[in-house]
């Protein structure tokens, strides 16, 4: 049971990334948009809010690989025609890391306040 509780956040996070990748891949094929990697920011931040920052960082790294393979030209290759697309990936990584850190810092005081209140009531 304890192992199942550890696997569920990972499975949910990977499923969310797969769903977002499918939507963005379809959008890339139908409209030939660029810079779609930044749409991964919302699911990554949501994972940071719901689960842990480490899992969100792992998902950000996976999102970079998925974006490079499925969303950047040439499709289905890790090589890029345009060097600026590597800049998109680097900017996404930096923005995702900063967002995850901000979310974790914003959520931390609430847990500390609850812990302090429970100590005062108990002691």
Image (cartoon, helix red, strand yellow):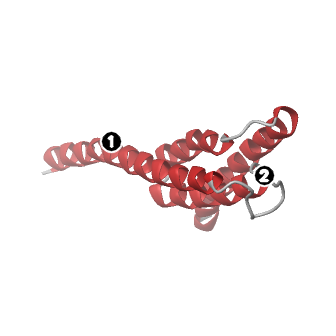
Q: Determine the residue positioned at 58% across, 65% down.
A: 2
Residue 48 lies left or right of residue 5; in this view the side is left
Mark 1–mark 2 distance (CA, rounded to whole Å): 37 Å
Residue ranking furthest to the top: 31
Cβ atoms under marks 1 and 2 closer than 8 Å:
no
Q: Camera-side residue: 74 or 2?
A: 74
Q: Determine the residue positioned at 39% across, 44% down.
A: 103
Q: Determine the residue positioned at 19% across, 42% down.
A: 117
Q: Camera-side residue: 100 or 69?
A: 69
Q: Choose top left, top right, bottom left or bottom right for residue 43.
A: top right
- Mark seen at residue 11: none
Residue at the disc numbered 2: 73
SS at badge 2: loop
Quadrant location, the N terminus? bottom right
Residue 15 lies left or right of residue 25; in this view the side is left
Dot 1, how many residues are within 10 Å of its Cα: few (below 14), some (14-19), or many (20+)?
Answer: few
Q: Is residue 85 above or below residue 58?
A: above
SS at badge 1: helix
Label 1 vs label 2, nearer the camera: 2
Q: Camera-side residue: 34 or 121?
A: 34
Residue ranking furthest to the right: 30
x and y percentages locating residue 115 in the rendered image:
25, 48
x and y percentages locating residue 17 in the rendered image:
69, 49
- Mark seen at residue 106: 1
Q: Which comes before the other along the chain, label 1 or label 2? A: 2
| Total residue callouts | 2
x and y percentages locating residue 69 in the rendered image:
76, 58
Residue 114 lies left or right of residue 65; in this view the side is left
x and y percentages locating residue 54 in the rendered image:
48, 61
Q: Determine the residue positioned at 59% across, 60% down.
A: 61
């Amino acid at each position: 049971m304890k192992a199942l509780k550890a696997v569920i956040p990972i499975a949910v996070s990977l499923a969310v990334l797969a769903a977002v990748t499918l939507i963005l891949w379809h959008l890339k094929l139908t409209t030939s948009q660029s810079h779609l990697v930044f749409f991964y920011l919302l699911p990554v931040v949501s994972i940071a809010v719901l689960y842990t920052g480490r899992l969100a960082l792992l998902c950000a790294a996976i999102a970079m690989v998925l974006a490079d393979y499925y969303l950047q030209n040439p499709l289905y290759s890790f090589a890029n025609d345009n060097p600026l697309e590597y800049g998109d990936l680097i900017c996404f990584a930096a923005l995702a890391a900063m967002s995850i850190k901000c979310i974790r810092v914003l959520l931390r005081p609430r847990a500390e306040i609850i812990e302090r209140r429970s100590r005062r009531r108990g002691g």
